Amino acid sequence: MTASDSARPSIGITALGSFAPARVVKNEEFEARMDTTAEWIESRTGIRERRFSAPDEFTSDVGLGAVRDLLARDPDGLKDVDMVICATASPDAMFPSTAALIAGQVGLAGAGAFDLSTACSGFVYGLGMARGLIQGGMARRVLVIGAETITKIVDQEDRNTAILFGDGAGAVVVGPVPDGYGFQDFVLGADSAGGSSLYSRFLAHQLPGGFPMGKWTGMNGREVFKFAVRVLGDSGAEVLAKSGVKSENVDWVVPHQANVRIIEAAAQRFGVPMTKMVMNLDRYGNTSSATVPLAMKEAVDDGRVKDGQQILLVAFGGGLSWAAATLKWWSGAPSVQARDWAGQARPEVVSV
């Protein structure tokens, strides 16, 4: 660590919340319209059910739900936030940004706001951007949201993609934390050579080089699987090395929730057992940029993630892109500590 590194404030997560749409879609619903079975889907992916947004429910709505959940858990959670980042592959519009739409509804109108597009790796990218903005003096605290209504851009008759994806959102505030806590390092990367393996069209009908894109999100499952196993494993190992953390000292890994087989293979590559993987893939499916914060909040709430524990975050996405981060968990604020729900009703968040 250099002198300049030691002089930097410790930056970590100071508040969090999440939201999932009300409609639960079980594997059995796909049996009626495509050549598959509930058992086949679960055996190949690890997914049993996922959430679908309502026809009039969009990404700013689910993102707003996550921020409102954060505020229900900590009414002061947004204090001093002056920048909002929304990681999403399914924005309400190209502009105004989904980040600005959410900010305007939670009392942050006038804060800087922008969307970040690296698909499923976007939330971890957003955490890295937030830390950099704070360390560079451009923000005091940053609200980072991972939000998707990705089922609206997936062909629901395509077995290769429809069975995988669900909708949801997670939100965190990134800001100063006590010394010894917070983010230690990040690894961020992308390689457009694999872009034709996972894409969603907007203006262009083809990628550079001539690869044609159809109306719906497209995926080459075999190529994505090979890429994901490699980059999740390699980026996880790289960020551990950069942070000076040994794999045996990692308490929890929060991976992108794409496919249980990918997570199992990647875990072997960076040397952390499956017993340390935080997973809720079976109940939410692949919610793209929302998977990491959704899983993280569950693990905090149920007491798995405790103060001072070593956390590894790893994700991959369209681009093709990848992101990994290490942090020491701080539980000194109301929404970032385990919840004792005995005898209480959990905070209810109603989508707008």
Image (cartoon, grey):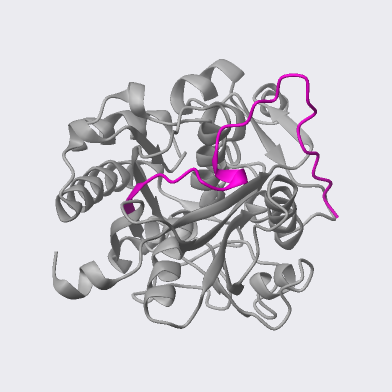
State which quarter of the image contains the C terminus: bottom right
Q: Where in the figure is residue 194, as x and y percent of width and height?
A: 32, 60
Q: Relative to residue 284, is residue 272 drawn left or right?
A: left
Name above or below for residue 269 compared with residue 13: above
Q: Where in the figure is residue 232, as x and y percent of width and height?
A: 29, 45
Residue sitting at x 72%, y 48%? 69
Out of 202 and 300, give the one closest to the viewer.
300
Residue sitting at x 38%, y 55%? 197
Q: Where in the figure is residue 303, as x and y percent of width and height?
A: 51, 27
* Residue 166 seen by the camera: yes
Quick one: which residue is furthest to the top in this view?
Answer: 39
Give the dominant element type of the magenta stretch: helix, strand or loop. Answer: loop
* Residue 271 seen by the camera: no
Q: Where in the figure is residue 136, as x and y percent of width and height?
A: 37, 81
Q: Relative to residue 196, is residue 174 drawn left or right?
A: right
Q: How many marks?
A: 0
Q: Relative to residue 269, is residue 171 drawn left or right?
A: right
17 drawn magenta: no
Out of 31 and 295, give the one closest to the viewer.
295
Read off the magenta span. Answer: 324-352
Among the 4 quarters of the image, the one containing residue 23:
top right
Out of 221 and 14, give the one closest to the viewer.
14
Residue sitting at x 45%, y 33%? 305
Q: Relative to residue 63, is residue 3 drawn left or right?
A: left
336 drawn magenta: yes
State which quarter of the image contains the N terminus: bottom left
